[in-house]
Amino acid sequence: MSERKRRRPERERRGFEDIKSDSTGSQTKPEWFEQQKRERERERGRQPRDKSGNNSRDKSKNNSKGNSKDTPRRKSQRGQTSGARDARPRGAPSRDARGRQSPRPPSRRDEPRKRKKPMSLFKRRLLIVLALLGMIAVTVFLAESLLLRVTEIKVTGDEIYAQEDILKLCGVREGDNLLLIPASDREQKLESQLPYISKAKITRKIPGTVIIEITASRGVCSIESGGAWYVIAGDGKVLETCPGPKEGLMQVLGVTVQSAKVGETLVLDNEEASTVFTEIVGIIDRLGENGQSAASEFTKMDLTNLYDMRLWYQDRIECILGSNIQLDYKLTYGYGNLTDPEKGIGDQEQGVLDLSYLPTKRASYFTPDEGSPGARPTVAPDGTVPDEPEATATPEPGRGDGIPDGPFTG
């Protein structure tokens, strides 16, 4: 009998050996049972540890060294198992010594992907708003630092005050923000504290330029109050005070001053007189040719009687205005008669030019003084004719038929 047959009973006896209990009452398993379990664990790719914390693989190695005598069948089974494991293609499921398929450990590919929850509508809108605010903030910062800083200041227009005085009073400096300059306040400050500035206009141009345009005030007349004379502009603004009437300006008589402060509008004690005075002064300031004022050509104005106002031109022609009806028409038409070299009153004549009937009869009447080069009898406005034989029977409006009925335009 071969050795294999002789060992079979002992091997079968060992294979069916009952599990015995030790003296402590705990059950012990045979060595071959533990060894097969370790082989199965090793084939599955896991490395179990025993109760003491040591690797079971190392323990199996130690046990295999202590028990080097294995049966030929176990060696052949182990050889067949290892050969089958080596011959198994990659990716195929592993099997234990008895041919049972071991469970494959789960991989990341087998795990289901977690789908991200979509962003809510509120969060998306909030994100868009924050992005827009950030872009606006960056744009404002760049514009404020690069385009809105004052780098140049120009003073243009009429040169009546030094540029240093204007800039000092205006308060605009290089480096200021263009958008933060209070233009209207600075303009009013210049007009009030520098009286000869009729209008100040501050213009801002990007990038970094400030232009201050100055329009000068012109004195039109002088008016006396309390022993002092005040120079008045065409808009009624008080320009300065003088000890006497300023040369070359028209003197105003027959009014009482209530308030006269430099840089402010003149106020008379009579409201109607104040309105008429401001209107006449403004018209005279606009009558000049080529932008020049006609104020220097009129020498005196009497407002004692508001229904019989009178104005003197070059101290040789007395103009009767009458009431305040159509003052603009009267002054414009009369100034045309006084300055027209062909159809108007001669520059050497003296007399009285009556403009009071102009709104109703569309005609003015000139009465020359005695000794005047153009002295001749004229029909009075009431229709009476002088006794001189040279008198004509019909009224002659103004200086003749050639004078137009409408306002004189030059």
Image (cartoon, rainbow, N blue to C red):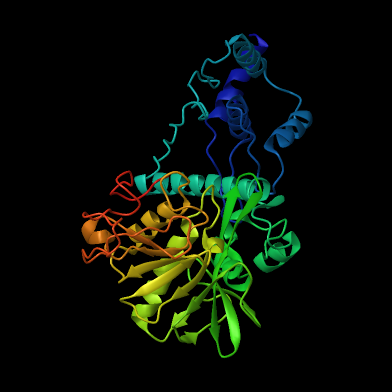
User: For this rendering, which residue is in front, 400 or 308?
Assistant: 400
Location of residue 49 with respect to 358 vertically, above or below: above
Q: Position of residue 272 (x, y in %)?
A: 34, 79
Q: Position of residue 358 (x, y in %)?
A: 28, 59
Q: Is residue 39 left or right of residue 255?
A: right
Q: Position of residue 380 (x, y in %)?
A: 27, 64
Location of residue 218 with respect to 28 vertically, above or below: below
Residue shown at the point (50%, 45%) measured from the top left = 131
Image quadrant of residue 385?
bottom left
Q: Residue furthest front?
A: 389
Image quadrant of residue 64?
top right
Q: In this orientation, does residue 23 appear? A: no
Residue shown at the point (32%, 71%) measured from the top left = 322
Q: Residue furthest bottom?
A: 226
Image quadrant of residue 388?
bottom left
Tally of numbered discs: 0
Residue shown at the point (58%, 40%) measured from the top left = 29
User: For this rendering, which residue is in front, 115 or 218?
Assistant: 218
- Quadrant location of the C terminus? top left
Q: Is residue 317 left or right of residue 361?
A: right
User: For this rendering, which residue is in front, 56 or 89?
Assistant: 89
